Amino acid sequence: MTEPVKRKLVCDTCGQEVDQVRRDVVDADYNAISKPPLWNCERCYEQKRARREGGRDGAGGGSP
Ligand SMILES: [Zn+2]
């Protein structure tokens, strides 16, 4: 079995393969030490950030 050397990064939120992921720090309420770091793609990262800043989420999410 010969696997390709290049390894794709996978977003932990949407599971999409991306070239670059950002580490999303869990909420301060959570224990970041006991929880593994979450890797998010650019889109998910922005969504989480926006949601955290806004506080309230408007209708029209991308959930199936
Ligand atoms: Zn994602």
Image (tube, helix red, strand yellow):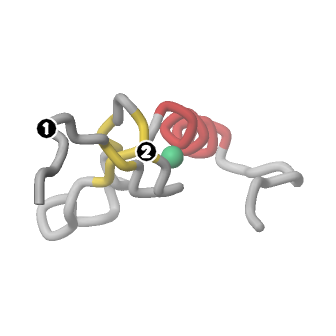
Real-space Cα distance between discs 1 and 2? 15 Å
Q: Which mark is residue 38?
A: none
Residue closer to the observer: 52 or 2: 2
Q: Position of residue 16 (x, y in %)?
A: 49, 49
Tag 2: amino acid: Glu
- Residue plotted at (14% across, 70% down): 34
The image quarter in which residue 63 lies: bottom right
- Residue plotted at (37% across, 30% down): 19
The image quarter in which residue 29 lies: bottom left
Q: Is mark 2 within 8 Å of ligand 1?
A: no
Q: Position of residue 60 (x, y in %)?
A: 87, 52
> Is 54 situated left or right of 44 in this image?
right
Report the residue marked by disc 1.
Answer: 5
Front tag of 1 and 2: 1
Q: Position of residue 3 (x, y in %)?
A: 16, 50
- Residue plotted at (83% across, 49% down): 58
> On the rendered image, what quadrant is the N terminus found in?
bottom left
Q: Is residue 59 above or below residue 51?
A: below
Residue closer to the observer: 45 or 19: 19
Tag 1: amino acid: Val
Q: Which callout, 1 or 2, points at the residue further toward the start of the chain?
A: 1
Q: Which mark is residue 17?
A: 2
> On the rendered image, what quadrant is the C terminus found in?
bottom right
Q: Is residue 49 above or below residue 58?
A: above
Residue closer to the observer: 25 or 5: 5
